[in-house]
Amino acid sequence: MKIFIIGGTGLLGSQAAEELIKRGHSVSSIALPPIPEGAKLPKEMKIHLGNYLEMTDDELLYHFENCEGFVFAAGVDERIERPPSIYQFFKKYNIDTVKRLLGLAKKAGVKHAVILGSYFSYFAKKNPEMELTKWHPYIRSRVEQENEAFKFANGDFNVAVLELPYIFGTQSGRKPVWTFLVENLLAMKRITFYPRGGTAMLTVRQVGEAIAGALEKNIGAKAYPLGYYNMEWKEMISIFNKHIGREKNKIITTPKFLYRISMRKIMRDQRENNIEGGLHMVKFADLQCTKLFIDKSLGCEFLGVKKDNIEEAIGQSAKMSVEIITNNKKVVEMKEE
């Protein structure tokens, strides 16, 4: 297959490209500059540096020409803060762009599309009583992204949404999403406080396998909840501490009400600065303090995701975060694309 990726130089997009090329597919991409310093990108991938949001439909159709597969590995995540209404921001980057791109892909004759989504969508559908789309603009955008994407699917156009969990691994020159967590862990000298709960997770390599598997295997419109490893926060934090020089710290699990108290302060600061986050942090305690586990039979097994070394991937994320914090290393951070 000839495959076109939006975001092919990113952490996940580049891994998808590497896996696809290894399987015999050809890959081209549009990505925002700059390319992260030292990033190992497949030399076979054709890269056009630019902002697809600023391109005309005809310009984008040129990139879709003769492609059978399309991967959207861009969009924005819950870390973003903006003035109200932040939902409109998420709608622009996570929903409107997907609608436009899938429409163009279908027009160009593409047969298979893969959208990188969030496992919060899975839990929103699984637990409607939590009203996650009501309280969290980011989660609402991801659920609506799925719904809109699936409207394009028919017998000639297959659309898969990968509901991705927490992901570990690094790309040289790119700031890990875990740097903020590492900063907080480093600040706790002898005792590490963290709430109960846990999460599903994947390595970066496993995400690449899932993307390739979805392009090759998915039929129709389908969401794949992805999780290969399930780990309680306490175990995950102990691995982080091991790699950041806090291995002697005692880890104390804190109750949900204490987490809520700390989140109230964050939300108060947001209001005072006239900004909103993608998550209602007080309400988010209900997710943070539970086990957000996903069995690999729900998606990973069908897509051909193989076992990997999750502890090593967590360690890589932790050590690179420390390097960036201590050396003030110049890296590429998340951009809206």
Image (spheres, rainbow, N blue to C red):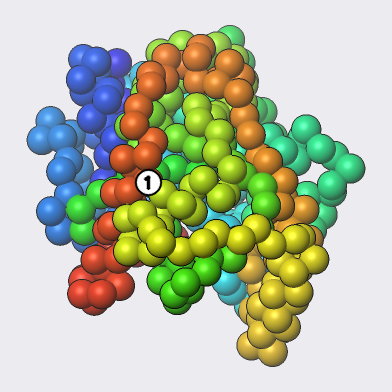
Q: From where the camera sits, is residue 143 visible?
A: no
Residue 76 is left or right of residue 53, and the answer is: right
Q: Is residue 256 above or below residue 14?
A: below
Occupied quadrant, residue 12: top left
- Secondary structure beneath disc 1? helix
Badge 1 amino acid: Ile
Q: Position of residue 325 (x, y in %)?
A: 30, 72
Q: Nearer the viewer, residue 98 or 211?
A: 211
Q: How crowded is mark 1: few (under 14 residues within 10 Å), some or many (20 or more)?
A: many
Residue 151 coordinates in the image, percent (x, y): 66, 28
Residue 36: give x, y in percent of width and height: 20, 57
Residue 77 x %, y %: 53, 55
The reply to whether residue 167 is in sight is yes
Report the quarter where the N terminus lies: top left
Q: Split into 4 quadrants, where in the image is the C terminus?
A: bottom left
Q: At 17% across and 41% down in the image, what residue appears? A: 41
Residue at image point 51% right, 12% down: 302
Q: Nearer the viewer, residue 81 or 301?
A: 301
Q: Residue at x 45, y 35 (%)?
A: 202
Camera-side residue: 239 or 305? Answer: 239
Residue 284 picture quarter: bottom right
Is the residue 133 above or below the residue 265 in the image?
Answer: above
Q: Is residue 60 left or right of residue 181?
A: left
The residue that mark 1 highlights is 314
The residue at 55%/11% (across/down) is: 219
Quick check: 165 left or right of 84?
Answer: left
Q: In this view, does 320 lie above or below 44?
A: below
